[in-house]
Amino acid sequence: MAGRCGGNDEKGDAKADNAGRCIRASSGVPLATVGATVHFPALMEQSISLENVVGFLVSTPLFSGLDPAERADVVRIMEVKRLREGEAVFQEGDPGDAWYVISEGTAVVLKEGEGTTREIARLNRGECFGEMAILDGSARSATVKAASDLTLFRFRRARFEDLLDQGSLGAYKLVVSMARVLSHRQRELTKQIADLLEKKVDRVSVRQSLHINMVSE
């Protein structure tokens, strides 16, 4: 991790030094540049390098079309959320109040039905989920939990909408990217339904595809 963070500022929330440009995670308090919600003490002192954050975003397809100024707009509203294995990011039925990008670890998508809980997808580093919250804020259609220790970048719907209201080109580009992702998933789903009608695939495969489409919600 590039550079080192200094001590806390006068409020004890964060410190960004000029040499290392690091942000130190705190508990539940949005930071000036990168917000943080830390769920366990072991990672309270872990630093986050802005270089690493920016490098990660550049390598993630959803963010790759943003220029440095546009990325800065997005990073300004970003929060960091860390969970232990087994902790829930959100539960089925929760409000759609944010969307997420996986920085480290693996998440599992679970769906309740017929008295059982089924795993319908696994999400890894660089994958996004919950994007539909930006479009309609509807309730979550599935539960997402940490399948390992998990670090997420969280973007709250209200703060993202503020960026849109301010005319942020970066925020508008992200909405376009999300729409493309959702459109691709819809096309895949339509194709698999057509294949089912032609009896080229079995019903289980299409049922799984229907569930995976819920990841965006």
Image (cartoon, rainbow, N blue to C red):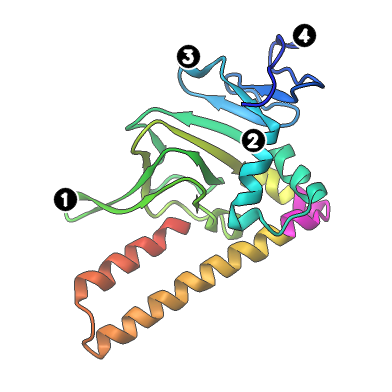
Q: Which residue is mark 1?
A: 115
Spot occupied by residue 154 in the image (x, y as percentages of width and height): 58, 40
Q: Which residue is mark 2?
A: 52
- In the rendered view, would you say 88 is above or below 196? above
- Per the rendered image, the range of residues in magenta is 163-172
Q: Which mark is residue 41?
A: 3
Q: Is residue 55 visible?
A: yes
- Residue type at mark 4? Glu
C-alpha distance separating marks 1 and 4: 51 Å
Position of 183 with respect to 214 (left or right) is right
Q: Are the residues at dot 1 and dot 2 in contact (C-beta closer than 8 Å)?
A: no
C-alpha distance separating marks 2 and 4: 25 Å
Q: Earlier in the sequence, mark 1 or mark 2?
A: 2
Q: Residue at x 59, y 52 (%)?
A: 60
Q: Which mark is residue 21?
A: none
C-alpha distance separating marks 3 and 4: 21 Å
- Label 4: state its secondary structure: loop
C-alpha distance separating marks 1 and 3: 35 Å
Spot occupied by residue 11 in the image (x, y as percentages of width and height): 73, 11
Mark 2 vs mark 4: in front:
2
- Residue type at mark 3? Pro
Q: Residue at x 66, y 66 (%)?
A: 176
Position of 66 with respect to 88 (left or right) is right
- Residue type at mark 1? Gly
Question: How dense is the environment of label 3, judged by Cα within 10 Å: few (below 14), some, or many (20 and up)?
Answer: few
Q: Are the residues at dot 1 and dot 4 in contact (C-beta closer than 8 Å)?
A: no
Of the pair 121 and 156, the residue shown nearer to us: 121
- In the rendered view, would you say 1 is above or below 141? above
Q: Earlier in the sequence, mark 2 or mark 3?
A: 3
